[in-house]
């Protein structure tokens, strides 16, 4: 076996050393992604209180101590899952067909995320619930309210909240399996029916 020249790394082609810190940065990003994904699944399935950091770490396949390192704790990790679930861009409203189709397909594949449950179900985690409700209002209610206000319909906020609540309730009921035909319907089959239901919150002219 030929001895490597001084200053070279025999484990890399040509003795070139990998860029310092690059693998660690990639590993950190991957660990964060795995933790967020595992947390979203567990929070949606079991709720915030009954999910432990150890369980999140086990499902993610990483050290649970990384939750504190990367996020600051379980609450901050929960808030990160809400941001990932609902996104950061300003969305179209629920009466836009592409927006409604995208949400239906997303929730059909993954089920309702933790924000839906935290926002509509009772609990005692004020910070967690407030964050979830804030994001739901920003992503679901406010775009509808702005549409209704621009159309000069009466009580645009109430109508927007009614439509958003109907949507959230249908997503949760669909996931629970309590309504067999609703749970079994394909997104494309459900899309026009749901659109008509939500549109009923807006008075016809």
Image (cartoon, helix red, strand yellow):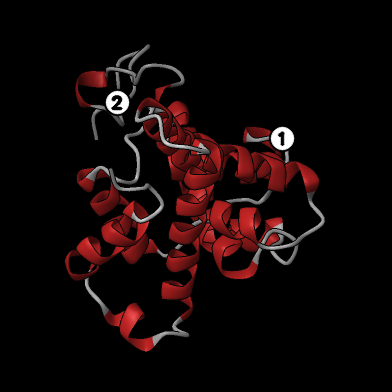
> Could you say where residue 129 lies in the image, as x and y percent from the top left?
70, 48
Q: Secondary structure at mark 2?
A: loop
> Could you say where residue 69 lies in the image, as x and y percent from the top left?
67, 34
Q: Residue furthest top?
A: 7
The one nearer the camera, 91 or 114, is 91
Query: Could you tell me which residue is drawn at 35 percent across and 39 percent down?
Result: 93
Visible in this render: residue 82?
yes
In the rendered view, would you say 74 is above or below 15?
below
What quarter of the picture does the N terminus occupy?
A: top left
Query: Which of the numbered marks, if any, corresponds to residue 3?
Result: 2
> Could you say where residue 53 lies in the image, as x and y percent from the top left?
69, 55
In the rendered view, does 6 fall on the left or right side of 76? Answer: left
Query: Could you tell me which residue is drawn at 29 percent across and 50 percent down?
Result: 100
Query: Could you tell me which residue is drawn at 41 percent across and 52 percent down?
Result: 201
- Circle 1 sits on which residue? 72
The one nearer the camera, 137 or 75, is 137
Q: Secondary structure at mark 1?
A: loop
In the rendered view, would you say 27 is above or below 22?
below
> Could you say where residue 33 lies in the image, as x and y percent from the top left?
45, 43
Q: Residue furthest right?
A: 124
Q: CA distance from mark 2 to mark 1?
A: 46 Å
10 Å crowding of disc 1: few (<14), some (14-19), many (20+): few
Visible in this render: residue 30?
no
The one nearer the camera, 184 or 157, is 157
The one nearer the camera, 68 or 114, is 114
Rendering quarter of residue 107 = bottom left
């Amino acid at each position: 076996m030929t001895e490597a020249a001084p200053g070279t790394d025999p484990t890399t082609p040509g003795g070139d050393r990998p860029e310092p810190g690059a693998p660690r940065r990639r590993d950190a990003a991957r660990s964060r992604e795995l933790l967020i994904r595992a947390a979203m699944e567990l929070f949606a399935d079991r709720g915030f209180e009954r999910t432990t950091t150890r369980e999140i770490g086990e499902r993610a396949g990483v050290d649970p101590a990384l939750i504190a390192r990367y996020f600051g704790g379980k609450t901050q990790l929960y808030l990160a899952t809400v941001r990932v679930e609902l996104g950061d861009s300003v969305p179209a409203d629920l009466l836009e067909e592409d927006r409604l189709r995208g949400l239906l397909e997303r929730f059909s594949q993954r089920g309702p995320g933790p924000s839906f449950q935290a926002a509509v179900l009772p609990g005692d985690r004020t910070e967690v619930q407030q964050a979830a409700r804030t994001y739901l209002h920003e992503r679901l209610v406010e775009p509808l309210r702005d549409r209704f206000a621009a159309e000069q319909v009466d009580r645009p906020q109430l109508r927007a909240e009614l439509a958003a609540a109907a949507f959230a309730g249908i997503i949760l009921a669909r996931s629970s399996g309590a309504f067999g035909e609703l749970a079994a319907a394909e997104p494309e089959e459900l899309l026009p029916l749901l659109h008509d239901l939500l549109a009923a919150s807006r008075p016809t002219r």
